[in-house]
Amino acid sequence: MIREILRMGDPRLWQSSRPVGRVPSQELDALLADMRDTMRAANGAGLAAPQIGVPLRVVIFGMDFNPRYPDAPPIPWTELVNPVLTPLGDEVEEGWEGCLSVPGLRGVVPRYARLRYEGFDPQGQRISREVDGFHARVVQHECDHLDGILYPMRMRDFARFGYTDVLFPDMAAGEE
Ligand code: NI
């Protein structure tokens, strides 16, 4: 079922989410089904459970080709429960981000260039990956939602924050 995506300003987006207690479960499967439906309908690259008003530590992400990120490399489809992120090194990269909870806007956000993420898949199998680049960026963005952080709160240069259609007038129309 497609759920409403909460938008910036809704206090539920500032909350810290709690860990999922049991994996697998029917409740978790139902939540993930709604998250997939909602993310696909919005053409997003990722979604965190609190964005649909569920304060649990669950994120999904992945991308073949997304017109919102036409230059981004593919990211394997991932459903991640109780994620833990560990930066690998101090290197930080800046890059453009958008968020389904901040529709119509983009901003440049500093993120760790490389990290390890660990957690569980919906069947309870361990996931552990080392990633970099856009994959690492997406994971950090989604997991920030679990701590009540939206990307504008990470920004350092508000001269690089604006409306997508103004910043990128050549991008395909009809997104967001
Ligand atoms: Ni987001």
Image: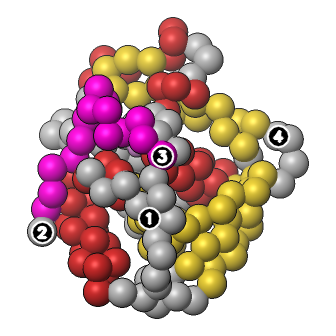
First reached walking from the N terminus: tag 2 or tag 3: 2
Q: Closer to us: mark 2 or mark 4?
A: 2
Q: Closer to us: mark 1 or mark 2?
A: 1
Disc 2 secondary structure class: loop
Disc 3 secondary structure class: loop
Label 4: which residue?
91
Q: Main secondary structure of the magenta part?
A: loop
Where is residue 67? Give x, y as percent. 32, 49
Disc 1 secondary structure class: strand
Tag 3: residue type? Ser
First reached walking from the N terminus: tag 2 or tag 4: 2
Label 1: which residue?
58
Report the span colored magenta. 2-16
Marks 2 and 3, how far apart in space?
A: 24 Å
Where is residue 110? Give x, y as percent. 65, 32
Tag 1: residue type? Val
